[in-house]
C-alpha cells in the first residue's frame, strides 16, 4: 500500500522529471541550431575566401591557391574541411570531387549560400556526415561572358555535435541543480504539510486500549478537523456504551450486596440452630455459595472502579507507600493468624519513606487482593512478606510467599478475568485481573516470578512521581 506522502511526492516530482527531460530535448535542439548557425557562418566565410582565390582572366580562370593553404584547411582530421570548385556546376576543377551536389530542389540564386547535409566517403570506405555550403557565383571574361561557378565547402558534423553537447551540458547542469533544489523544497513542504497527520497517527497509536478521551488537534489544518471530529464522535459513542455497561455492572453488583449479606447472615444463624446433620450440610453449602457470591459481587464492584473510563479522570497524589503497607498489613494480621499464616513487612533498606504517585484507595485494594490471594493459595501455614524499595524513578512493591507458586505457562493467563490457575479455594478468578487493571491505570507494570527456595513473588512497578506518571501516559 502506497503512503499518502509517497503519492504526493510522486505526483509533484514526476512532472518535474518530465519537464526536465523535455527541457533537455529543447535545449539540445536549440544548441544544435546555434551550432549549425555558427558552423554555417564559418562555411560561408571559407567559401568566399576560396572564391577569392579563383580569378577570371581572358584565357579562363586563374587559381591562386597555394599548397600551404590547402594543408591548413585539411590539417585537423577531427574537423576536416573539404572543398570543391566546379564550372560549369558539376565539372570539377579544384578540390575534392567526392562532395555531393546540392539537391535538385535547391534554389540556385547567385551569391546566396545554400546549406545542406550530406555524406562523404572516407579513405577506409565508410561514409562520414558533413555540413555543406554551396555558393553559386557568376563570372565572365572577354571570351566567355556570363559563366556560372559552384563553390562547395564541407565540414564534419562531429564538431557541430560536440558543440551542441557542450552547450547542453552547460545548460543542464544548473537546470539539474535547480530541479534538485525544487525537489528538496517539495519534499520538505510535503513532510511539513503531513506533519499534523503524523501527529494524529502517533497520538492514536500511543493510546492505551481503554483511553477514550477526545483527540486534541487545535493546531491542525482545517482538513484534519473533520477527521478528528469523526474520531471523537466515535470515541464518545464507545465511551458512552462502555460507561453504560460499567454502570450496569456496578448498579447490579451494588443491588446484590444487601440481599447477599442478608443471605449470609440467615444461613449462618440457620446453620448454628440446625440439629440434623444432613440439614447442616445443606445449609453449609448454601452459606459457602452466599460467601462466594458476596465475594464475587465485591470484586465486580472493585473491577468496575478500576477500569479506565469507569468515571472521571483518576485522582492521584503522592502516597507514602511505607505507611500504607504497614497500616494494611496491621489490619490483615488478625485474619492471617486465624488462617495460620505468618504475615509481615520486610525491614526497609532506608529509613526514608517511599512514595508513589497513585490513587491511595485503589492501590490499597490492589495490595489487599495480592495478600488475600497469598493467604488462600499459598498452602497451610504460609509465610507472606510484603516489601518495598526504590528503583530509580519507580518504586517496587513486592508480595512474596512460600507456597506452590504458579506454573510459568499459566502466568500470562492468570491476569485474564475469571481464569484460575488452581482448583483450590473458593476464588472467582478476578483478583489478579483487578490488580493488573489498577497497576496499568497508574502507568505501572506487574510481574510474576519464582521465590527462593519455592513460592511466588509478585512485583508491582509504580511511578514514584507525577512527572514519571505523565511521561508514561504520553
Image (cartoon, rainbow, N blue to C red):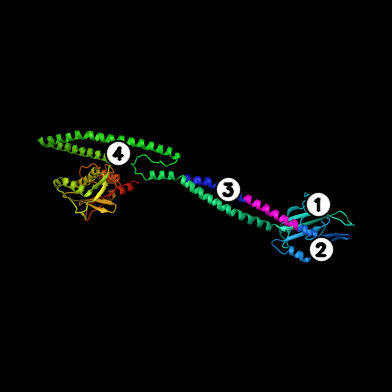
Which residue is found at the position 23% from the left and 37% from the top? 297
Using the rendered view, name the quadrant where residue 315 is placed: top left
Task: Tell me if label 3 and label 2 are in contact, CB under 8 Å.
Answer: no
Rendering coords of residue 14 (x, y %) = 54, 47
Picture layout, residue 64 above or below residue 20 = below
Task: Tell me if label 4 and label 3 are in contact, CB under 8 Å.
Answer: no
Rendering coords of residue 379 (x, y %) = 18, 49
Question: Which of disc 4 and disc 2 is earlier in sequence?
Answer: 2
Q: Which residues are magenta?
A: 25-45
Residue on which disc 4 sits: 312
Is-magenta flag for residue 38? yes
Q: CA distance from mark 2 to mark 1?
A: 22 Å
Which residue is found at the position 44% from the left and 40% from the top? 224
Which residue in the rendered view is the most extreme toward the bottom? 68
Q: Is residue 404 left or right of residue 176?
A: left
Q: CA distance from mark 2 to mark 4?
A: 112 Å
- Mark seen at residue 18: 3
Q: Nearer the viewer, residue 400 or 102?
A: 102
> Considering the numbered disc 1 on the image, is that residue within a helix, a strand or a loop?
loop
Question: Which of disc 1 and disc 2 is earlier in sequence?
Answer: 2
Residue on which disc 2 sits: 64
Rendering coords of residue 454 (x, y %) = 22, 54
Rendering coords of residue 364 (x, y %) = 22, 44
Amino acid at each position: 500500500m502506497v503512503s499518502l506522502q509517497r503519492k504526493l511526492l510522486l505526483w509533484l516530482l514526476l512532472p518535474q522529471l518530465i519537464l526536465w527531460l523535455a527541457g533537455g530535448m529543447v535545449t539540445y535542439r536549440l544548441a544544435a541550431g546555434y551550432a549549425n548557425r555558427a558552423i554555417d557562418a564559418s562555411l560561408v566565410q571559407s567559401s568566399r575566401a576560396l572564391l577569392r582565390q579563383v580569378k577570371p582572366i581572358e584565357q579562363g580562370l586563374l587559381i591562386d591557391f597555394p599548397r600551404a593553404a590547402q594543408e591548413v584547411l585539411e590539417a585537423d582530421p577531427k574537423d576536416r574541411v573539404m572543398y570543391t570548385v566546379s564550372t560549369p556546376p558539376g565539372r570539377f576543377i579544384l578540390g575534392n570531387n567526392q562532395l555531393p551536389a546540392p539537391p535538385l530542389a535547391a534554389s540556385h540564386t547567385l551569391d546566396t549560400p545554400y546549406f545542406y547535409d550530406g555524406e562523404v566517403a572516407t579513405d577506409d570506405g565508410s561514409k562520414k556526415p558533413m555540413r555543406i555550403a554551396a555558393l553559386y557565383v557568376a563570372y565572365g571574361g572577354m571570351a566567355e561572358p556570363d559563366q556560372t561557378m559552384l563553390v562547395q565547402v564541407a565540414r564534419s558534423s562531429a564538431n557541430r555535435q560536440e558543440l551542441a553537447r557542450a552547450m547542453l551540458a552547460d545548460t543542464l547542469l544548473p537546470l539539474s541543480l535547480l530541479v534538485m533544489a525544487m525537489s528538496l523544497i517539495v519534499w520538505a513542504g510535503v513532510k511539513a504539510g503531513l506533519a499534523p497527520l503524523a501527529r494524529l497517527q502517533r497520538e492514536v497509536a500511543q493510546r492505551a486500549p481503554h483511553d477514550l478521551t477526545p483527540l486534541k488537534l487545535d493546531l491542525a489544518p482545517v482538513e484534519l478537523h473533520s477527521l478528528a471530529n469523526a474520531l471523537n464522535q466515535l470515541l464518545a459513542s464507545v465511551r458512552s456504551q462502555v460507561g453504560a455497561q460499567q454502570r450496569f455492572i456496578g448498579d447490579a453488583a451494588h443491588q446484590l450486596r444487601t440481599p447477599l449479606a442478608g443471605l449470609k447472615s440467615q444461613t449462618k444463624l440457620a446453620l448454628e440452630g440446625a440439629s440434623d446433620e444432613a440439614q447442616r450440610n445443606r445449609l453449609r453449602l448454601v452459606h459457602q455459595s452466599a460467601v462466594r457470591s458476596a465475594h464475587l459481587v465485591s470484586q465486580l464492584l472493585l473491577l468496575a472502579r478500576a477500569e479506565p473510563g469507569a468515571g472521571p479522570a483518576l485522582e492521584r497524589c503522592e502516597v507514602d507507600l511505607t505507611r500504607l503497607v504497614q497500616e494494611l498489613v496491621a489490619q490483615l494480621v488478625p485474619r492471617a493468624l486465624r488462617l495460620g499464616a505468618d504475615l509481615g513487612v520486610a525491614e526497609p533498606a532506608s529509613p526514608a519513606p517511599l512514595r508513589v504517585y497513585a490513587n491511595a484507595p485503589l492501590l490499597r485494594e490492589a495490595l489487599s487482593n495480592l495478600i488475600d490471594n497469598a493467604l488462600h493459595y499459598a498452602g497451610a501455614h504460609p509465610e507472606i512478606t510484603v516489601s518495598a524499595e526504590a528503583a530509580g524513578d519507580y518504586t517496587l512493591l513486592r508480595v512474596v510467599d512460600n507456597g506452590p507458586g504458579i506454573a510459568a505457562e499459566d502466568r500470562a493467563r492468570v491476569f485474564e478475568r475469571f481464569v484460575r490457575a488452581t482448583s483450590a479455594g473458593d476464588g472467582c478468578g478476578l483478583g489478579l485481573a483487578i490488580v493488573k487493571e489498577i497497576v496499568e491505570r497508574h502507568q505501572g507494570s506487574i510481574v510474576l516470578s519464582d521465590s527462593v527456595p519455592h513460592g511466588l513473588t509478585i512485583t508491582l512497578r509504580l511511578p514514584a512521581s507525577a512527572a514519571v506518571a505523565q511521561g508514561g501516559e504520553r
